[in-house]
């Protein structure tokens, strides 16, 4: 299972992305527990709104952080997120 670059990516309705004050970081909450995220991972997942595909997410993050060459890292993370069920594609 891997990201289809042409399809939009959305956050799974079975999970919730939120800021956790106690940990001072974004987390994914789900019935079985919680996953703490680093800032980069959280920024990627916040863009998984069902309106953007891989290229659009990459472009937005490269502009936001004034960097280029992020596609491979973002794609790799999104593949892990897809395998963990945090995100989904139609």
Image (spheres, rainbow, N blue to C red):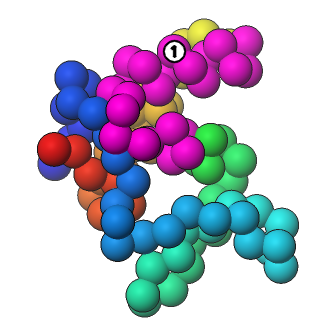
Above or below residue 22? Residue 26 is above
Question: Which stretch is magenta?
Answer: 44-66
Identity of the residue drawn at 49% across and 21% down: 58
Figure disc tally: 1
| Picture quadrant of residue 79 | top left
Q: Residue at x 38, y 29 (%)?
A: 52
Q: Is residue 52 magenta?
A: yes
Residue 74 x %, y %: 47, 32
In the image, residue 85 lies at what x, y percent? 30, 63
- The x, y position of residue 84, in whole percent, is 33, 64
Query: Where is 38 relative to 14, above or below?
Result: above
Overall secondary structure of the magenta section: helix
Residue 46 in view in this figure: yes
Query: Image point 35% across, 72% down: which residue?
Result: 14
Along the horizontal axis of the image, is 64 left or right of 28? right
Q: Secondary structure at mark 1?
A: helix
Q: Residues within 10 Å of mark 1 (few under 14, many from 20)?
A: some
In this picture, residue 38 sits left or right of residue 54: right
Q: Residue at x 16, y 44 (%)?
A: 90
Q: Residue 63 colored magenta?
A: yes
Q: Quick one: 9 or 5, which is closer to the camera?
A: 9
Most foreground residue, 14 or 39:
14
Q: Quadrant of residue 24?
A: bottom right
* Outermost bottom residue: 32
Residue 12 image point, x, y percent? 34, 61
């Amino acid at each position: 299972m891997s990201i289809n670059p042409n399809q939009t990516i959305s956050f799974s309705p079975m999970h919730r992305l939120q800021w956790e004050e106690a940990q001072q970081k974004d987390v994914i909450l789900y019935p079985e527990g919680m996953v703490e995220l680093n800032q980069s991972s959280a920024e990627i997942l916040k863009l998984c709104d069902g309106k953007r595909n891989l290229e659009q997410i990459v472009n937005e993050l490269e502009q936001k952080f004034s960097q280029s060459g992020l596609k491979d890292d973002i794609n790799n993370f999104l593949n892990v997120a897809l395998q963990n069920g945090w995100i989904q594609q139609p």
